Image (cartoon, rainbow, N blue to C red):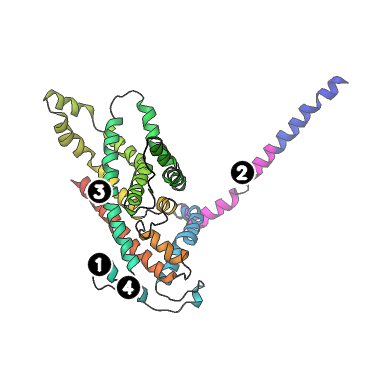
Amino acid sequence: MNDKFASWPHRVLAVVTGALRAITHLMLNIPERPMRWAQRVLGGQRIAWLFLTPNLIIFSLFTFLPILINFYYAVTGGVQLWPSERPFIGTENFQKLFACDNYFDYSTCDQDLFWRAIYNSMKFVSIQVVLMVLFSLITALVLNRKIVGRGFFRSVYFFPVLLSPVVVALVWRWILLRDGVLNAIIESMGGEKVLWLLDPSWSFFWVIFVTVWAQMGFYTLILLAGLQAIPRDVYEAAQMDRASPWRTFRKITLPLLMPNMIVVLALALIRAVQTFDEVFVLTGGGPGSATTFLVQYIYNTGFAQQIQRFGLAAAASLVLAVVLFILTMAQLRASRSKIDG
């Protein structure tokens, strides 16, 4: 009797296993006939398009279609969201953006905030990218040396890249608030509180600092890979010739690292022009318009104001797209010339 009841779990397990095998066999063999038929109809070379079709549909719906809609909004006016209710106005939105008496004085422009955003973006990019490349290069050079805990420090510098930009900005906002951690430390040392995010100069400084801190690990990794790809015998030959460290860096390391430097510079430029998340959470574009960049202007114009001017925001986004296209083409040309050279 006991043997009879003891065999029941084995029987149940055998039935379940057999059912799973049958279902798996059925699922694997169902697509076989349609795929053989598709291969006969399309041929061996064109059947690849059958596998690409789902991705092409997704890209068309969520990438190409929004781009076409954006072009349509840029040449239409009104405040209506539905495209059929928007009147065609041609290039009027672009004319509003570029209507200026003096392009070097944004207060004379019809859309002065747009030009203030361009001025802020140019200032931000010129400072942030230089500091990004500089600190990434210094960090990569240090982490490429034989130091204690090198693997640990490599992980530490790359860790901020794994965090969401919103999380990074929230953490630093918590540190920089009037009653935040940094002011608490200053007060404990006998100092006075500083309004880090309400002073235009300080807020611009902290936006640069936070973005460099958050993104530097990614570019450091690229430069570190380039440094490790340089043959060691080149350095040994320089050491035998008694070349100084600075001469070795200038004549050997920097030229051989230049392809990676070009990639880092181009990626940092494109990323800096598109900066939005950290600034939106950290300062919201303020105080006033001190940290309002081009993407922030597009967002505010299209969604954050009481009167949502979708056409003007779409036109500004196309201006940004042209800038990004020029930067991308410059990066590709520089990379190609470096490879050919």
The single residue placed furthest to the left in the displayed view is 241
Task: Tell me which label, 3 or 1, sits earlier in the chain.
Answer: 1
The residue pinned by badge 2 equals: 28
Q: Which residues are magenta?
A: 20-44
Residue 144 occupies quadrant: top left
- Say which quadrant the N terminus sits in: top right
Is residue 322 visible to the viewer in this orientation of the structure?
no
Residue 328 vertical position relative to residue 3 in the rendered view, above or below:
below
Q: Amino acid at mark 3?
A: Ser
Residue 117 vertical position relative to residue 230 in the rendered view, above or below:
below
Q: Amino acid at mark 4?
A: Asp
Answer with left or right where residue 53 lies relative to residue 223: right
- Disc 4 crowd, CA 10 A, few/some/many (<14, 14-19, 20+): some
The residue pinned by badge 4 equals: 110
Question: Residue 335 — which label?
Answer: 3
Task: Tell me which label, 3 or 4, sits earlier in the chain.
Answer: 4
